[in-house]
Image (cartoon, helix red, strand yellow):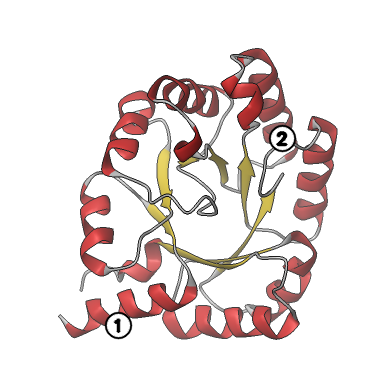
Amino acid sequence: MAESIARRIDISAVRAHHAESDVRALAADARRGGFVNAHVLPHWVPLVRELLDGSDTLVGAPVGFPGGGHATAIKVAEAEWLVANGVQELDVVINVGRLLSGDDAYVRTELAAVREVVPATIPLKVILEVSLLGADDIRRGSALAVETGADFVKTGTGWTGVPVTLEDVQTIRAVVGDRAKIKASGGLRDLETVLAFRDAGVERFGIGVGPALAIVAAEAAR
């Protein structure tokens, strides 16, 4: 039997208004849907580890979220805290402003510093925010991500309201090849779109709980 698309989907509750009830509901949906990962804001990680204990769903959290403009020392401290408190995957937002400024040295140093405190056993995803970048910026960001040890290059936070495109994925893939996997996020709302992105080389998807459950149900109904 083919693996369910749920094993490629990260669901999340990472908005400021998400309360404990939302986080508990996320964990329940993660178990029910069999999703590979449930992402929450950092302070909820210990609770979600407890809620998902014994399940096949990993607990993820962001670093430098959502803008990426935190000082490097803050990103490193956040990553260290998350590792100490049981996080199983990390998504770090690249410093978009530095990347757009052509300050590759800053971006490289920062990503390397975060990678240094994240064990190799914990997958690290670098978020580019492609809707704010030109093609050259995407290529440079992708190269810096893999150069500093990222396991995934992620297209964006999904917060800009601009849907990710297959062209974005193709631009990333042309740079990273097999050196890193790709995670796509933003505007992915139906099974057909997800399958098209999967066929384009996307390994993981960041999708809201409602659409994610609908996508899994659509796959089961085929």
Q: Relative to 171, does residue 155 appear above or below in the rendering?
A: below
Q: Amino acid at mark 1?
A: Ala
Q: Amino acid at mark 2?
A: Val
Q: Position of residue 172 (x, y in %)?
A: 37, 32
Q: Residues within 10 Å of mark 2 (few under 14, many from 20)?
A: many
Q: Which mark is residue 114?
A: 2
Residue at 23% x, 76% y is 219
User: Marks 1 and 2: CB-CB under 8 Å?
Assistant: no
Displayed quadrant of residue 182: top left
- Dot 2: what SS? helix
Q: Quadrant of the N terminus?
A: bottom left
Whichever of labels 1 and 2 marks the residue nearer the N terminus, that label is 2
Q: Residues within 10 Å of mark 1 (few under 14, many from 20)?
A: some
Between residues 179 and 130, which one lies in front from this camera angle? 130
Q: Quadrant of the C terminus?
A: bottom left
Residue at 39% x, 74% y is 211
Q: For the view shown, which residue lies furthest in the front direction? A: 161
Q: Which mark is residue 217?
A: 1
Residue at 53% x, 29% y is 145
Q: Position of residue 128 (x, y in %)?
A: 52, 37
Displayed quadrant of residue 35: bottom left
Q: Position of residue 107 (x, y in %)?
A: 65, 23
In front of the other: label 1 or label 2? 1
Q: Is residue 160 left or right of residue 60?
A: left
Q: Is residue 189 left or right of residue 84?
A: left
Q: Position of residue 159 (x, y in %)?
A: 55, 54
